[in-house]
Amino acid sequence: MTAEDRPTRNGEIGPAEWLAMNRTGSFDWDLDTGTIDVDRSGLLVFGVPPDAFDGRPLTLVERLDPDERAALDGVVRQAVTGGEVSYTAHFPIPQDDGQPHWTHVQARILRSPDGRARRIVGVVRDTTAEVTRFAFVQELEKRREVQTNIVERTTTALSRAVTVDDVTAALTGPGGLARLGADGLALGLVENGSLNIIALSGESLDVLNDFRIRRLDRGLPLAEAVLSGRPRFVSSFPSLGRDFPELAPYLERLEFRAACYLPLVAQARSLGGMALFYRGRTSFNADERNLALGLAAIVAQSLQRAILFDEERELATGLQATMLPRRIPAITGGEIAVRYHAAWSGRQVGGDWYDVIPLPRGRVGIVVGDVQGHDTHAAAIMGQLRIALRAYAGEGHAPSTVLARASRFLAELDTNRFATCTYAQVDLGSGTLRAVRAGHLGPLIRHTDGRVGQPKLRGGLPLGLATVFGDEEFPETRLDLVPGETLVLCTDGLVEQPGSDIEAGLAALSEAIKSGPPQAEALADHLSERLWERWGSGDDVALLVLRRSPDPGTPKAPRIHQYIHQADPQGLSDARAAVGQALRDWGMPELADDSELLTGELLVNVLLHTEGGAVLTLEVLPEPVRRVRLSVQDRSSAWPRRRTPGEAATSGRGLLLLDALAARWGVEPRGEGKAVWCEIGPAPVPADASANGS
């Protein structure tokens, strides 16, 4: 073997190539005579036999493609007529074997004193080897760039994957196969001695659904790769069918020509296997095999992290679940629904909680709170605090006392943690709530007319901090739930969105409550679907929905209830309109005007002369002669006093209107307050008059 025949490695220049690259000749072109003198080497570069050259320039370029010849002629003409002293040209000359030889010309133009071109002298060089090597290097770089891009894009996509589901979504979701440079994918995990295919992506791969869960044995190529720890590259599906007869009937339905079966191993642990399928490939060179192995390593590392995360997550959520009440007690006069949404961050669980506590005299305690921090320690403190608060409430203490004792308990744990919460004692029989707040969000109430209000609850310091700073005052606020109204308590995870003001979250929550269904369970589902999806899963969320049972009366004696806030002119107007509309709907339009007028008088009296809101009840009395009864309940123990207003007085006429328009009216004590009522319609017939008439 000669030096010229010796093989070379990719990218290196052999002796034969070196000689070809250095084949150089010269020429002298006489422009006056139109002849050109070319040495032997130059003629070989042009592909012209030395003994057949006739000295004409056209003979040198007659092999050129017409377009290339015209381009070369243009370069020379431009240089000669443009007064230039030199020019270069690079062009291919087709050979007898059909392969082009690339030629490079460097020429100098010699001119007479008057500037006229007389001669062109120059060198001609065969650059075929250089061009070929450049094309090879360019193609090699292109392939390496594609492979690097595949690795980078796959790594980037998987770097954001947290769970096993995230990993499969990154591999099989939009752009997943393109990132891998494949046309199909199968991903399997080893679980309890079986190979479970958790992902199939690519056209026609659904035919492999029969193999989704199989015992881990050597009957299938992916399982063999997992057991042996060695990859298998397949360039012929018929040969694959011979090696794995059980798979053979399915191979004809797969629209692929090649595949590679790769074990997924991380830290010496076999996690599963991955198969990549290709349509346009029939072989795998060394670089392509290395790329496939690299992708398998990246996927294995991502799966290892994801499996560990899922295991930690299951442990953390299991711990958290044991800290929350397993069962919500049934209540009389209403319905309660609770929801809990854990933050999606591994062991970084939070201390949010809810509870429903049976209390003496048929009441119920409800609480939603949040312990500072997002770790298992916060969850453990939450469990202890929930039990302590439940015990204090169950002893029958007032809400302010319950939170004061809970604050003391948390401070004595010496954990350097604090907690926020809202606690309320609820009497569903009367609709009375006594609520206290410790640095927490207050409740929202959906009224029977669809409005959503946010009562102002005076609050104290967070639990624990209140004791440290010596301020264990938790003022109570009384609220009233009329039949059919709904109260919503939640932790801040439901209304806080990163980068957004909490008021925007509260507004979104109010809108979701307003647009949701009335039932507690259905409303809780509605809020979960609307807001957890909106805010994401960066924080724990505890949600409690309490609805007082509606009291619509009967078809013959219908009834409505409505709560009107103090100093709410719009609420007063809405209440009057609701009364009038209800009477028209009930077929009693003749009573609508008087009822609206008396509704306004009764409500104005309460809202001006008491310190709270009022509960309005309108009902039809089931008597032979139908009348309507209006009742306005407030928290004041002061009874209305009849006065004789002067001519210029602006008040004092309310009771006079009652006397004039109502068939009868009165005042009754109700709990801590009273109810002023009136009946509108035909006057009741005295019993003796009825007897005489008969």
Image (spheres, rainbow, N blue to C red):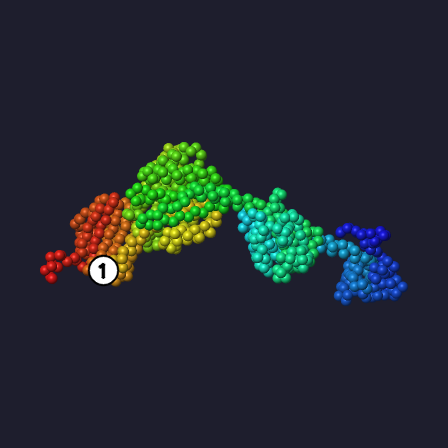
Q: Is residue 17 left or right of residue 650?
A: right
Q: Is 637 above or below relative to 117? A: above
- Asked whether 573 or 220 is in front, the reply is 220
Q: Badge 1 is on which residue? A: 591
**Residue 21 percent coordinates (x, y):** 81, 54
**Residue 210 percent coordinates (x, y):** 57, 57
| Residue drawn at (43%, 51%) of the image | 528
Q: Label 1: how many residues lie within 10 Å, few (<14), some (14-19) or many (20+)?
A: some
| Residue drawn at (38%, 36%) of the image | 407
What amino acid is labelled 1 in the image?
Answer: Leu
The residue most toward the right is 51
Q: Is 122 above or below relative to 490? A: below
Q: Is residue 172 left or right of residue 400?
A: right
Residue 208 visible in the displayed image: yes
Q: Is residue 239 left or right of residue 326?
A: right
Residue 87 visible in the displayed image: no
**Residue 429 percent coordinates (x, y):** 28, 48
Q: Is 220 above or below relative to 368? A: below
Element at badge 1? helix
| Residue drawn at (64%, 59%) of the image | 248
**Residue 321 percent coordinates (x, y):** 44, 44
The residue most toward the left is 692
* Res. 586 image quadrant: bottom left
Q: Is 544 above or below relative to 403? A: below
| Residue drawn at (32%, 42%) of the image | 359
- Asked whether 14 or 260 is in front, the reply is 260
The mark total stands at 1
- Asked whether 500 or 681 is in front, the reply is 681
Q: Quadrant of the C terminus?
A: bottom left
